[in-house]
Image (spheres, rainbow, N blue to C red):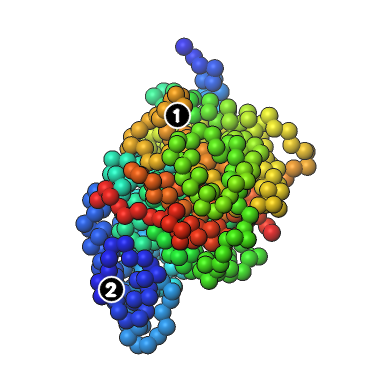
Amino acid sequence: MTTKPEMTAADIAKAVAGGKLSALDATEAALARIKQHDTILNSFTDVTADRARAKARAIDADIAAGKTVGPLAGVPFAVKNLFDVAGLPTRAGSKINRDLAPAKRDATLIERMEAAGAVLVGALNMGEYAYDFTGENVHDGPSRNPHDTTRMSGGSSGGSGSAVGGALVPIALGSDTNGSIRVPSSFCGIFGLKPTYGRLSRARSFPFVASFDHLGPFARSVTDLALAYDAMQGPDADDAACTTTRGLEPTTPLLANPVSDLRIAVAGGYFQKNVFPEAVEAVSRVAKALGATQVVEVPEAARARAAAYVISTTEGASLHLDRLRKRPNDFDPAVRDRLIAGAMVPAPLVDRAQKFRRWYRAQFAEIFKSVDVLIAPATPCTAPKLGQVNFTLDGVELPVRANIGIHTQPISFIGLPVVAVPVPLEPLPIGVQIIAAPWREDIALRVAYALEKMGVASAPSPRGI
Amino acid sequence: MAEPLDDYIDAVSKALALPVEQAWRPAVRANLEVSLRLGRLVDEFALPDETEPAPVFTV
């Protein structure tokens, strides 16, 4: 058996476990696709071919010896280059971090993916220090959109979106502070899960904004997304924010449960403003398919976005303060100037922004008493052109970078779980956020699965490569 | 001509020993203006004195 470019992780694992496909062949196929297409996509910064082949051979040896293998046996995956990969400096999209000593140990989530049988094939391009929504990088060049390589992949997990959207690997991992999983998912036309804050360990990944940093998976199908998510769950003493109160809550067995009992509404007000017609169309298709007619107003979402901005720029500045002093010219100038400004924001504004989170969280707790799922745009538009500075909406010219994440920021601000589902519009896909109550990733994934089965959400074949 | 935030930028730059070269100043100032505008939006929202920050979901 040979692999096909868009073979799902579930199908690869089934074929490998069943002896129809070797893990080594699955790995070689991914490495060949990376070699063939990544000169254009520029999604990988490191390809760990030797390590991948060794891991694949070990899996094949286990199968030959009759040992049980994990649910992701032989599945190639890659990680945003802010994850520690043993033997590589964790560059986090920067020039400066390349001078760090190589990581001694993999990030927890890589260890858990590999414990489930997955095979790490490399590290992925990203916006510098994750302070980005475009997928562009001044040091490594932009990761490109697999459906139109003149367009943005979205950021900051741009390489993750590009690699999965381009079907180089079936699963990638990324991080989401203000939208960095959901934005590339939207632009690249794939599924992405930003779990509840604290659900998945961030141990041995390079941070950005401790209050908002989440890690999570990207995939081309909801089943693959759930398989990866389930493999990575569990407490971890190495991440102070990782939950110790929630046990393992597998979602894969629940995916096919009906969604007819769920109360699903469309997020109104703020979430219906500043959107292009394609975002309106995508939300409308999802709402119609789910029979969602109720519109729920989310109070003070604009203020939540403002508070998320203030906390991000100040916590980011604090993280990088010494690097800003010692190596300011080694930053992307745009990132440096934002971070320096962040260091100058008066502390009371940050404290008030953090306190506002509690008020805002309470509003969502009320909403979730009568609603199980909220639907909202993932991005206001499909992927802009690389380097594009402004777009015109309702006759008003707006800056692209500042507006890409306006619908994701008020959600990650309080850590709600979200699945970004791709709606395959022409000529470019666009994502919709399926938002659930805290710790109810299972519900968001169930709804995403239902949309996939209805044909409303799907990852289109890459057309740009 | 000096901009209204320039004195503030100079003072914080000194207080934090954080260099701001002249060439960067317009972009730093523009970013700070955005941060302060958004910060004002947060500032204007009245909160009870007892309000605690809410960094994580504990239940």
Mark number displayed over residue A393: 1
Nearest the eye: A86 or A428: A428
For disc 2, the chain is A
* Residue that appears at 56% across and 67% down: A257
* Image quarter of residue A311: top right
Q: Amino acid at mark 1?
A: Leu
Residue A265 visible to the viewer: yes
* Residue that appears at 26% across and 63% down: A31
Nearest the eye: B10 or A175: A175
User: Is residue A203 toward the left or the right of residue A294 in the image?
Assistant: left
**Local SS, label 2:** helix
Q: How many marks?
A: 2
* Image quarter of residue A80: bottom left
Callout in the foreground (1, 2): 1
The x and y percentages for residue A420 are 48, 52
The x and y percentages for residue A463 are 28, 50
Query: Between marks 1 and 2, how big is the CA–CA gap?
Result: 49 Å
The residue sitting at the top extreme is B1
For disc 1, the chain is A
Q: Mark 1: few, some, or many residues within 10 Å (few <14, many ≥20)?
A: some
Q: Amino acid at mark 2?
A: Leu
* Residue that appears at 25% across and 72% down: A2
* Residue that appears at 28% across and 44% down: A149
The residue sitting at the bottom extreme is A65
The x and y percentages for residue A422 are 43, 51
Nearest the eye: A7 or A141: A7
Q: Eyeballing the image, is A227 above or below B17?
A: below
The x and y percentages for residue A81 are 38, 54
First in residue order: circle 1 vs circle 2: 2
Q: Quadrant of the C terminus of chain B?
A: bottom right
Q: Which residue is mark 2?
A: A24
